[in-house]
Amino acid sequence: MTRRPRPRGLRARLLVAFVLVTVLGAAAAAWSSAGSARTALVTSTQQRLTEAVTGRIEAVVPELRYPPDRAALDRLRAAVGSNTLVTYEDMRSVGGADTGLVTRELRAAVRSRNALVTQRITAGGRPWLLIGTPVTITAPDGARSPSGIEVYAVRDLAGVERQTDGLTRSAVSTAALALPPAVLLALLASRSVLRPVRDLRDTARRLAAGDLGARLPVQGADELTELTVTVNEMAESLQTSMTAMRRMQTDARRFAADVSHELRTPLSTLTAVVEVLATAADGMEADARESAELAITETHRLVRLVEDLMEVSRFDAGTARLRLEDVDVTGAVRDCLRARGWLEEIELTAAEEIVLRLDRRRLDVVVANLAGNALRHGEPPVRVHVSASREQVRIEVTDSGPGLPADVLPHVFDRFYKADAVRTRTPGSGLGLAIALENARLHGGDVTAGRAEGGGARFVLRLPRDRDPEDGRAGWDV
Amino acid sequence: MWCAAAAVLLAGCGVQPSGVTGGGEAPTGVAPGVTLYFVDAGGELRPQLRPTGRLGTVSDAVQLLLTGLGDSDLRTEIAPTTTPRVVVTSTPDVLRIEVPLTIDDVTPLGIDQIVCTALGVHVQGGGSRDTRAQVRFTLPTPESEKHRRCPVTG
């Protein structure tokens, strides 16, 4: 036997529960009332039949000869009616074909109890009532003694059975009648319960989709209304905190952008001054020249930092734009390394000539950053491997250094994150990897950090092929 | 499920067989004869069984009482009558016996003879022991209105 599927959904469950309760209740009520009516019917019929028999006996016995002869017994039997057996000592007067149904236990009870007894039996598929009674002699003072005359009557109860069957049928049909109203009520009840639930679901969906202004109308005062109010409050506080967070974020970005912008002009002046200082450095004393060189280096660092900050601000503001052109990726990577004089130290391998539509300058920034990091923080040999699949172009930069510790890995792309707390004064701005990642994302790709097989660090730049140039963050204005 | 429920419903219906149960008192009323009441030498009521072979009705018994005694050492305190026609009407509480006598034809003991004979047959025929007898005479008398009980059987 296959298991029937359980009803899913509130509506189906409500419907089933309602119908079950109603029909079971109706069936129980109808069944119990039919049962008591049936018992009452059987009892009253039995009483009527018994009283008829005793009435007929009492009407005739005062005129009956005692001790009775054969004729007297026949007269008594005729008076009681058909299907009657009258006995006195060894004499029997039998009338009717069904007197053979009289049971042995009924006879025994008549003799032992010296009172009228009845028994219901089923014979030949029909119910019968057996009535057995002695006829007693009453003394003038009321004392009773058995006369030895016994009367047995067999009565058919088929009529009663037909009536009780009718009662049962009406009980069943009453229970069945309760079915349509139960279904109707269940549908009404489920609708009134499910409509607010559906509204809640729709509102929750809108909230999840980002429509923080979604609210539910509050009606009534039931549990669902409490839930509605709670959902509204939740949406309210969510909206408030989201607004506050966005404002703070915007403020912070604008501040960074403003600061870097404001620093540019004084820095230009400072750079000019430092360059003058650099030309004059050769004629200085040794320690003065050292200070001048330090000032020159730090000024260059400051310039780079401000440039990086401005670049990051452009990404944050969404104003970074791609200047796409068809670029030979391997060639671009080689140019990038050659321009920085790294071709000697870095082993470049490329599978084939790969042409991809991208922003050449930004690719240069990313590769330079990854390769520069490998040279600075890792150990030679440093390898750059360019490969392509149908979906994407991979530029893999690996070194043979100690690699990235597991606790550092999740943070390498964070802004101003320094893996080594002691080595704070590195030439980098602390924004290089963040900018590399933003650039990769601008192309619809990404940069991931991991461990190379030899134990060193491995950075992989992935750039997708067949990208819609308008897609991605390039057109995303916040 | 509905088929099972219907089957359960239908299985419980109909007339179920039962054991032997009591159905009340057995009918009564057979008797080898009728009991009449006469007066003995000491002035006491005495029952006398007439072996008629059947109990008969109350009026039969009272008529038999009125026809007299036959040879016996008992006596009757009811005057002999030539037309012993007795009419008995029965209500739930009272047995009214109309006798073809005046109050002068009977002594109080004679009235008791009639009352005891009538109530005796009534009880023997299955009647209640609380039934009273009212003996109505042919001529108006306050005695006709009394509801009596038999001093012997109570």
Image (spheres, coloured by chain):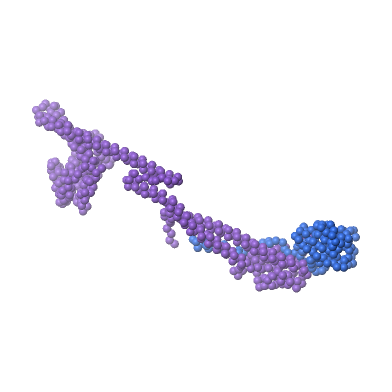
Chain colours: A purple, B blue
Q: Residue A147: give x, y in percent of width and height.
A: 76, 66
- In this view, the residue in front, A269 or A180, is A180
Residue A26 left/right relative to A151: left
Taking the spot 22% from the left edge, 46% from the top edge, the residue there is A475
Q: Residue A87: give x, y in percent of width and height.
A: 72, 69
In the figure, A190 relative to B118: above or below? Answer: above
- In this view, the residue in front, A122 or A199, is A199
Q: Residue A262: give x, y in percent of width and height.
A: 20, 33
Image quadrant holding the C terminus of chain A, namely top left
Residue A459 is drawn in which quadrant?
top left
> Can residue A226 be seen in the rendering of this structure?
yes
Taking the spot 18% from the left edge, 42% from the top edge, the residue there is A365
Residue A116 left/right relative to A159: right
- In this view, the residue in front, A227 or B145, is B145
Q: Residue A285: give x, y in percent of width and height.
A: 11, 26
> Can residue A423 be seen in the rendering of this structure?
no
Residue A163 is drawn in which quadrant?
bottom right
Residue A140 is drawn in which quadrant?
bottom right
